[in-house]
Amino acid sequence: MRFLLLGVAVVVGGLIFVSVWGSFHSRAEPAVELATPAVRAAVQVQATEAARQDAWPCDASQLPDRSWTCIVVQVALQNQGTALRHYDAHQFRLEDQTGYQYPRHLPGYYFPATGSAPLGQGTLLPDARVQGMLWFAAPRRRGPFTLVYQPSQADAVAFRVRLPDPLGEWR
């Protein structure tokens, strides 16, 4: 009887572990390289540049400690459908080698000299295009990193871009 109860407990524990583990990992295709476009929900997504940014406009006072760094990624989105498409910078995450995902991080200041404007949220008309910067804060030693784009549609598959390793310094 004890063995039966132990077996049931192991099976139930395994099922709980698998369901919890699956909730931390998004359903996705294999990651593509930087600058490779992919279409999700009629929106073409392309990460064109990625690098570390340890100096201005990355505000080190907003980071947890000195072992963290800002990672900046330039992305471009284009509506390839016939309907309006919404986009939001919050649909992007930075994933480290363990699978942990870091949300978007806003720099303390933004000046046009740093590149494109930060990607915000908005609506794309058919064939319209927008590009912008995404900033993330992550521990330096947690790379290599992957940019993950998860469209808002519940059945949409995440788009993953492997960022260069090691990441260079933003120009």
Image: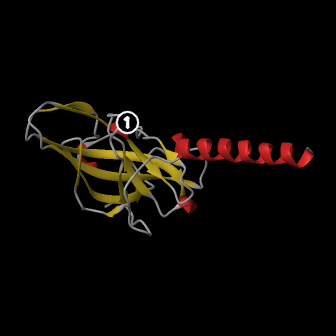
Residue that protrudes farthest toward the right in the picture: 2
- Tell me where residue 153 sits by quadrant: top left
- Left or right of 7 in this view: 129: left
Residue 74 in view:
yes
Q: Residue at x 85, y 42 (%)?
A: 5
Q: Quadrant of the N terminus?
A: top right
Residue 105 is situated, as x and y percent measured from the top left of the image, at 44, 40
Residue that protrudes farthest toward the front in the picture: 1
- Left or right of 104 in this view: 41: left
Residue 164 is situated, as x and y percent measured from the top left of the image, at 38, 67
Residue 126 is situated, as x and y percent measured from the top left of the image, at 8, 36
Residue position for label 1: 90
Structural crowding at the residue carrying mark 1, measured as other residues with C-alpha within 10 Å and reported as few (<14), some (14–19) or many (≥20): some
Q: Residue at x 41, y 38 (%)?
A: 106
Q: Please state the total of marks drawn on the protein image.
A: 1
Residue 115 in view:
no
Q: Amino acid at mark 1?
A: His
Is residue 139 depicted above or below 125 in this figure? below
- Left or right of 119 in this view: 108: right
- Tell me where residue 17 sits by quadrant: top right
Query: Which one is in front, 112 or 34?
Result: 34
Q: Residue at x 62, y 47 (%)?
A: 18
Residue 34 is situated, as x and y percent measured from the top left of the image, at 30, 63
